Image (tube, rainbow, N blue to C red):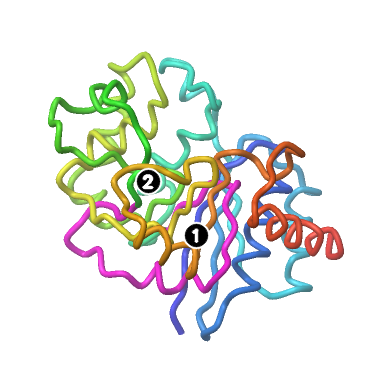
Amino acid sequence: MTEINIAFAATKNWFEFTMTSIISILSNTQDSSSYHFYIMSSCFTEEDKNNFHKIDKFKKAEYTFIEMDDSEYDKFYKNPLGNSTNYRLKLSSITNVDKMLYLDSDIIALDDVSELYNIDINDYYIAAVEDKCSDNMKCRVTRDSDFIFINAGMVLMNLKKFRINNVEEQLFEFLSIKNNGYCDQDAINAVCYNHIKYLPIKFNIMVGFMNNCSYNKEQYSDALNNPVLIHFIQKPWSNSLKTEFTQKWKFYNDLLHTII
């Protein structure tokens, strides 16, 4: 049986959204894979951990809660999204697995993520989907005009290569010299440059960036007809967001509230 390792980083007021994401993943499993969720946070309580374990009433999975120390990030530029977004950069040193799927908590699954997890990335540091970005964003990372910037909300990580090539050390070195932008995503793009496997948009459909990047109409159509992961750049718990995917998120969020 294959074990699928999935990591999330969250603050206390985002635990509900993390659990909604987990419910959606477990609802769409179609094979015999087992799931191990790694939850990184600096503010767990026992009640929080118990709420995650209540999901076992729906479908069993393994949970590892990783206590993070926010003071480690005080010396770096303050990310507009908070310290938790930097936690993913430490996955190679705080876990002992060789492959990890990192997901932001504003993502839901609409199909089996094992298809994504089983993609061969032995020759790469990461696999991810192209992000919408300006030339200014690219310039924070590289002067290469052909560089394809990836969105770090969904990253399939080859942690074995991270350890062999000291990638984590390089990521934090990048953070130490940058003082603007979304530094964690910039760091991943800069350090993993030339070691990225680019994936179809269906693995990270960014709601709010529906016309992003260089994807053509055929690629968009395929993604929307066969979505695997929906990433809400605009948040589904905001009444202002009206898309076909908003109701999907609300369905899994309502399902969560019948369990916990």
| Residue 46 on the magenta span | no
Q: Position of residue 237 (x, y in %)?
A: 73, 43
Q: Is mark 2 on a helix, strand or loop?
A: helix
Q: Name the residue under label 1.
A: 6
**208 horizontally vs 26: left or right:** left
- Please report the residue visible at 73 percent of the width from the left and 52 percent of the height from the top: 49
* Lower sequence index among marks 2 and 1: 1
| Residue 102 on the magenta span | yes
Q: Position of residue 41 (x, y in %)?
A: 60, 40
Q: Is mark 1 on a helix, strand or loop?
A: strand
Q: How crowded is mark 2: few (under 14 residues within 10 Å), some or many (20 or more)?
A: few
Q: Position of residue 90 (x, y in %)?
A: 40, 41
Specify the amino acid type for callout 2. Answer: Ser
Q: Name the residue under label 2.
A: 93
View extreme (right): residue: 258
Q: Which of 187 and 44 is in front in this view?
A: 187
